[in-house]
Image (tube, grey):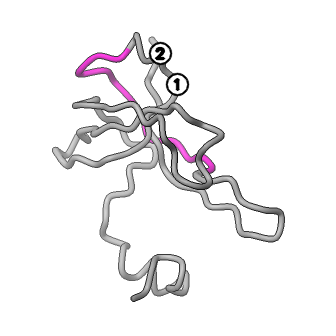
Amino acid sequence: MKTGFDIPPAKSWRMNKNRTCGWRQKARLVTWSIVTAAPTGMQRWAPYIVGIVELKNGERMMTQIVGVEVKELKKGLKCVGVMRRLFEVSPDQVIIYGVVFEIERE
């Protein structure tokens, strides 16, 4: 079975070029959960927030939510997709970046 890390970058891009990635897109927070038992590579950020956001086009996506304290969370918060490092890696590994959603401050 192949994982996303086994697929050459060009082929991965072709397979996903029509997929919404969320980067720089505006969204609203639909629901969220707090992750306290982080998987390998994400212990540095635990506890952290994951949530479902709804993009302007109506699509929903699961993502990490950043830039907000747990006590400030509420349904409908405005957020925007930003690029962040996703995992801690050793110096000889490739740094993996991805889109997370940051709460917009007014």
Q: In which quadrant of the rendered image does the N terminus lie?
A: bottom left
The residue pinned by badge 2 equals 105
Could you say which quadrant of the image residue 55 lies in?
Answer: top left
Report the number of numbered marks.
2
Mark 2 or 1: in front is 1
Residue at horizontal 22%, vertical 31%? Answer: 30
Q: Is residue 37 left or right of residue 92?
A: left
The residue pinned by badge 1 equals 67
- Asked if the residue under mark 1 is in contact with the one under mark 2, i.e. CB atoms within 8 Å, the reply is yes
- Residue 104 on the magenta span: no
The residue closer to the viewer here, 90 or 18, is 90
Residue at horizontal 52%, vertical 24%? Answer: 67
Q: Position of residue 32 (x, y in %)?
A: 30, 31
Residue at horizontal 71%, vertical 59%? Answer: 89
Q: Which residues are magenta?
A: 73-85
Above or below, 61 against 89 in this view is above
Q: Is residue 43 left or right of residue 48?
A: right
Q: Position of residue 15 (x, y in %)?
A: 36, 81
How crowded is the residue under tag 1: few (<14 C-alpha within 10 Å), some, or many (20+)?
Answer: few
Q: In which quadrant of the rendered image does the C terminus lie?
A: top left
- Residue 74 on the magenta span: yes
**Among the two numbered marks 2 and 1 on one chain, the one whose residue lies closer to the N terminus:** 1
**Circle 1: residue type:** Gly
What label does residue 17 carry, if any? none
At mark 2, the secondary structure is loop
At mark 1, the secondary structure is loop
Q: Main secondary structure of the magenta part?
A: strand
Residue at horizontal 32%, vertical 58%? Answer: 20
